[in-house]
Amino acid sequence: MTTPIIPASDPLLLSEYLTAFDALMAESVFGLEQTDKNLRLLPILRGLQQLHSLRCSEFESIVGAYQAAGGQPSDTVVYLAVRLFKLLELKSISPDQVFKVLQSSGTTAQTPARIILDKPTSQRQSKVLVAILQQVLGKQRLPMLIIDAPSTVRDPSKFNARAAGIQGLAFFGRDHTYALNDDMSPNWSEIHGFCDKYAEQPVLLFGFTFMVWQYWLSALNHAGKFIHLPHGVLLHSGGWKKLEAQRVDNATFKQTVESLTGVKRCHNFYGMAEQVGSIFMECSEGYLHAPHVADVIVRDPVDLSMAGVGEQGLLQVLSGVPTSYPGHSILTEDLGVLHGEDDCRCGWKGKYFSVLGRLPKTEMRGCSDTHAPAVKPYRPGAV
């Protein structure tokens, strides 16, 4: 017997969720002041918690354990430690509703996370991604140079975060050109052909940060080559930990991009396979911003209390997007710092922050751990 799409016992009817979500989507992506966004986003997050508690037995057990420990789920959005997605297959849909299974990156010694998507969640992810990226790229589809190999998206059985990123961003481009061969060496004929054709017009470049550095910029430098794309914009994400080991920071990365390619507009973004769609985009001032349907909280890594502005801690990311799995509130293993809200010089409203790196591999505690301390609620007016 399969679970109906809208169980009769759901306290939040799907139609109510969609009404609230669509109303929030109609707002400016980075135009809501934080107090207003709290009032709009919190009911959606609470509703998702109710929804997933009914549809996902593992999540229901976690919420129940939190409640038994003295927490108040009706006032709090419970978070899951991100590594739980590597240990459990968390889903809030029946097997016949599974549309796509997204795998996070993982080493041979590490089990990748499996993110279960139904078609409505996947479509919602795409809609949100489009709204966010149009703030940087505009609505015109641009010629696109992908700093990756075509084999990354060729095999649908190996659908992972890289493939999802490429496919998601490909919507914003046309004449998709892959800069790398399948062995990660530069495909110089494709690169030069793209530059000869589009050197004097706006273009989109996309790749994962470490790959852009290791297999494209380093290759250009080693070969003594310079390409000319002065009207280009580069979007990139992920892999900063490997670059930090090489002492490459964001400023160095941007300077190298401009010196070797002529690209002056370079935007990093922060996101993860466990919350596809609701990415945090880098503004013109170099800070990451929370969009209208998502938010971020910084927590003290020792007691998990909320950290203040300027204090370093673990990042908790919230998203109003996923209904097929309980990924609406996740405690990451990334360290960051909140710089402020509503007052970034770029003009975007809401919270803005920086990611500082990955927490050393130590035992994580969170609401999924029944021995974790109670956490402060995320409610209107909370930091």
Image (tube, rainbow, N blue to C red):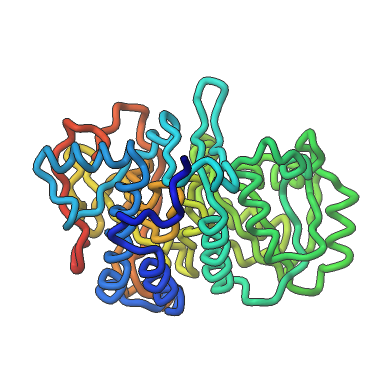
Closest to the observer: 243 or 73? 73
Extreme residue toward the top, this view: 109
Tell me residue 327's x, y (percent).
40, 48
Q: Is residue 193 left or right of residue 376?
A: right
Tell me residue 155's x, y (percent).
74, 39
Please tell me how many numbered marks the rendered image carries. Answer: 0
For residue 135, above or below residue 259: below
Which residue corresponds to the image point at 39% horizontal and 58% vertical from the top-left? Answer: 319
Classify the position of the C terminus by image quarter: bottom left
Q: Is residue 182 left or right of residue 123?
A: right
For residue 29, above or below residue 175: below
Quarter residue 19 falls in: bottom left
Closest to the observer: 119 or 192? 119
Quarter residue 302 falls in: top left
Closest to the observer: 292 or 248? 292
Extreme residue toward the front, this view: 1
Closest to the observer: 21 or 9? 9
Tell me residue 93's x, y (percent).
46, 46
For residue 325, above or below residue 144: above
Which residue corresponds to the image point at 30% horizontal and 47% vertical from the top-left? Answer: 53
Which residue corresponds to the image point at 21% horizontal and 52% vertical from the top-left? Answer: 307
Quarter residue 353 falls in: bottom left
Which residue corresponds to the image point at 32% horizontal and 67% vertical from the top-left? Answer: 41
Extreme residue toward the left, this view: 70
Q: Is residue 217 left or right of residue 32?
A: right
For residue 220, above or below residue 29: above
Tell me residue 200's x, y (percent).
81, 73
